[in-house]
Image: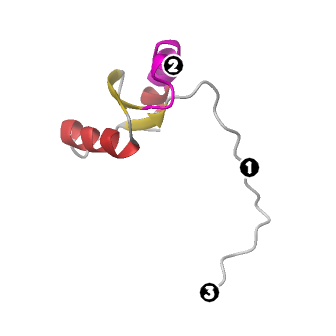
Amino acid sequence: MAIERELATYHENLVELLASQGKYVLIRDSEIAGCFDSYERALGAGYERFGLASFLVKTIQQAEPLLYFSRDMPGCPA
């Protein structure tokens, strides 16, 4: 999976990143390229700096929210 290195970098540096909790971090491979006030600014900086190469933009938060999905949901109405 292409994003594993970026997620590992996020988790390895989470203690330091929590100083910017609520902001968005930009990560490429094992490089933290910056923290931004909005998702849009982080995404724009990622495209400007890395072009179409893969990178991660993630909200800095102490605990990941739990998300629940069900396989028993009916299909979307047409």
Given residues 77 and 23, the one toward you in this image is: 23
Give the image location of residue 72, x and y in percent.
80, 65
Q: Amino acid at mark 3?
A: Ala
Residue visible at 50% across and 31% down in the picture: 22
Task: Answer whether residue 67 is visible to the viewer in this image.
Answer: yes
Distance of mark 2 from mark 3, alpha carbons?
44 Å
Q: Which residue is mark 3?
A: 78
Give the image location of residue 39, x and y in percent.
39, 43
Q: Are marks 2 and 3 in contact (CB under 8 Å)?
A: no
Q: Are marks 1 and 2 in contact (CB under 8 Å)?
A: no
Distance of mark 1 from mark 2, alpha carbons?
25 Å
Q: Amino acid at mark 2?
A: Leu
Label 2 or label 3, whichever comes before in sequence order: 2
Q: Residue furthest right?
A: 72
Q: Give the image quarter of residue 61.
A: top right
Label 3 or label 1, whichever comes before in sequence order: 1
Query: Viewed as shown, does residue 72 lie left or right of 26?
Result: right
Given residues 71 and 46, the one toward you in this image is: 46
* Colour convention: secondary structure
Give the image location of residue 24, x and y in percent.
42, 34
Tell me the SS state at disc 2.
helix
Q: Which residue is mark 2?
A: 18
Find out whether residue 19 is within the magenta segment: yes
Given residues 56 and 20, the one toward you in this image is: 20
Q: Amino acid at mark 1?
A: Tyr
Q: Is residue 53 above or below residue 12?
A: below
Q: Which residue is mark 1?
A: 68
The region drawn magenta spans 8-23
